[in-house]
Image (tube, grey):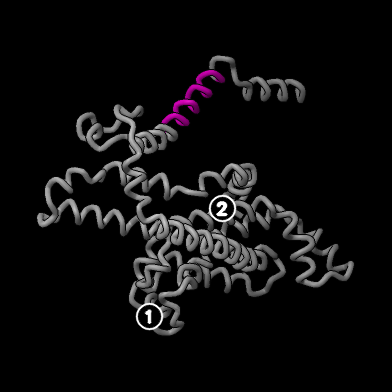
Amino acid sequence: MGHSAVKKRYVFNRVSATSNALINLLFIIICVLFIAPMVLVVMVSFTSEKALLANGYQFWPAQFSTESYQYVFKAWKDILRCYGNSILVTTVGSFAATAVITLYAYPLSRSNFRHKNGFAFFAFFTTIFGGGLVPWVFIYAQFLKISDTLLVLIIPYLVNAWWIIIMRTFMKQSIPEELIEAARIDGAGEFRTFFSIALPLCKAGLATIFLFCMVKFWNDYYLSLIFINNHHLYTIQYYMYSLLNGIDQILSNTNVPPEARRNLPSEGCRMALAVIGVGPVVFTYPFFRKFFVKGLIIGAVKG
C-alpha cells in the first residue's frame, strides 16, 4: 500500500511533455514582456527626433542617431560627478543598511532573547503609522543638521521594517538553535557567535538584503529633492529629474525660439536618461541572482 501511494504521488507530480512545453512557452512570453520595454527604450534613445515624431516609438531605429546622448553629455562633468555621488551613497549606504538590518534581525530570530517582542513592535509599528513629512524633515534638517550633506542621503534609509522581517525569518530558518547552544557551551560570546556562526550561514539572506538596499539607494531622488540644494551633491537620479524638468520648461517656454524647441531631442533625451540611469544596477544583478532567489524564497516564508 505504501509503495502504491508513493507511485501515485509520483504520477501526480509528473509533468507531461505537453505541459512542460506550455510552461516553457509561458515563461518565454513573460521574459519577452519584461525585456521588450528595455530594448524599446534603448532603441528609441538611438533614434533621431524627426523619425520619432514621424513614426513614433519603434524597436528598430528608422533613422539612427546619437543626438540625444550628445545633448545629454554636453554636461559630462556634471554627469560624472553625479555618478560618483550615486556610487558613493549606494556603496556606503548598502553596506551600512545591510549591517543595521542584520544586527536588528538577529536578536529577533533568537527564541531566548527576552525583549524581542518589544523590539519587534518598535520596528513593525512604523509600517502601520508614520510621523508625517514635517517632523521627518525637521529631525534631519533642524535636529541632526545634516541637510545638504551626503549623510542625509544615507541615514533615512538605514532601517526598513519589511527587510527586517525577511532577514529575521531567513535567520530563524537557517541557523539551528542547537548550533548556537553548542557554540555557547564551547565558550563563544555573543559577538563571536554572530560573526563566526550566524553570518556564514546567512550569505543568501545578506545578498538579498544588500541587493534591495542597493536598488533603493541607487534609484532614490526624493531625498535629494527634499534636502539637497548644493548641485555638487546631486545624485545621478536627481540630476536626470532636474534635466527632464529643464527640457519640459524649454518646450513650454514661448520665449524660446520655435526652431530651437523643434531641434531639441526631447523624446530621445528621456530615453537616453533612462538608459544612463539604469547604470550599474543592471550589471550588478547577475552576480547576486543565485543568492537573491534563495534568500527571497526562504525569507518570504512566514516564521
Tag 2 residue: 211
Residue at image x 78%, y 60%?
197
Residue at image x 64%, y 46%?
291
Q: Picture coordinates of residue 177 (x, y %)?
A: 76, 60
Q: Secondary structure at mark 1?
A: helix
Q: Picture coordinates of residue 244 (x, y %)?
A: 29, 53
Neighbor class of circle 1 (other Cα within 10 Å; few <14, some 14-19, many 20+) is few
Q: Picture coordinates of residue 117 (x, y %)?
A: 59, 70
Q: Is residue 164 visible?
A: no
Q: Secondary structure at mark 2?
A: helix
In-front residue for pair 151/109? 151
Query: Which region is colored magenta?
Result: 20-33
Q: Amino acid at mark 2?
A: Leu
What is the spatial separation of the Cα atoms under label 1 and label 2, in whole angstroms?
Answer: 30 Å
- Name the image quarter holding residue 68: top left
Tag 1 residue: 138
Q: Is 175 above or below relative to 12?
A: below
Q: Residue furthest left?
A: 254
Q: Amino acid at mark 1?
A: Phe
Which sits earlier in the primary sequence, circle 1 or circle 2? 1
- Name the image quarter holding residue 70: top left
In-front residue for pair 83/122? 83
Neighbor class of circle 2 (other Cα within 10 Å; few <14, some 14-19, many 20+) is many
In-front residue for pair 35/72? 72
